[in-house]
Amino acid sequence: MKKLLLLLLTFNFQLVTVVSFAQPINNPEIKRTWNWYFGVGAGLDFSAGAPIAITGGQSASEFSCSSISNASGNLLFYTDGTNVWNKNNQVMPNGISLNGGTNGRVLIVAQPLNDSIYYVFTTRVNPSPYTGFQYSIVNMNLQGGLGDVILKNDTVLLDSWEKIAAVKHANGVDVWITVSEIYTNKIYCYLLTASKLLYIFC
């Protein structure tokens, strides 16, 4: 497992999505990835199979981006690591000044067994000062279903590199979040469960 995690962290991806082609297109987990917002106002909709351009996106980052849809494939929100926008391309309450920055990395992960709570993980080394591995939390039950950032920039690991990956636990419910320590080969593993984020050394 260590070799697999190391391989995932070797690549400088903002978001790693592993999808089995044996799964049907109507699989809820696949539908969560149907809407992509990235770059400078760019977007793609994969609900029809082939990608269709989306206009109106507010992101303005060449490095950091992440989007999440619900189990039906409808966009919930997206972020460039600094701001969080709802499905109407409006900044969520408290959804500014996340420490991911446009040069960092960001990854959205749904809390297991909860369709309302989403973790926004960020990592940043440059520009200085680096803020390391942090998370913010979005509650989609608030603001009439448009979402609200209820916690912001909680530090998990200060000395983390700008690499982050997520993969489903073998139990099919929990999610592993992995980051690497800056200037070392050490990998840190965190398990996101239905109740908390746990640290487990890899």
Image: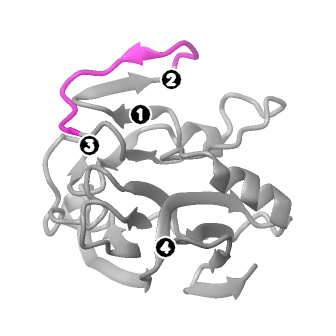
Q: Which residues are magenta?
A: 48-60
Label 2: which residue?
46
Q: Is residue 6 above or below residue 190?
A: above
Label 3: which residue?
87
Label 4: which residue?
160
- Earlier along the polypeptide chain: callout 2 or callout 4? 2
* Image coordinates for residue 28, horizontal then vertical, percent: 62, 44
Which residue is pictured at 41% across the width and 33% down the height? 36
CB atoms of marks 1 and 3 within 8 Å: no
Q: Quadrant of residue 21?
A: top right
* Image coordinates for residue 55, horizontal then vertical, percent: 23, 21
Q: Is residue 120 above or below residue 44?
A: below
Q: CA distance from mark 3 to mark 4?
A: 31 Å
Q: Amino acid at mark 1?
A: Trp
Label 1: which residue?
36
For discs 3 and 4, the disc positioned in front in the rendered view: 4
Q: Main secondary structure of the magenta part?
A: loop
Residue 146 as seen in the image, left or right of residue 2: left
Q: In the drawing, what numbered circle is on residue 140?
A: none
Q: Quadrant of residue 130?
A: bottom left
CB atoms of marks 1 and 4 within 8 Å: no
Q: Quadrant of residue 19?
A: top right
Q: CA distance from mark 1 to mark 3?
A: 12 Å
- How many residues crowd mark 2 within 10 Å: few (<14), some (14–19), many (20+)? some
Which element is circle 1 on?
A: strand
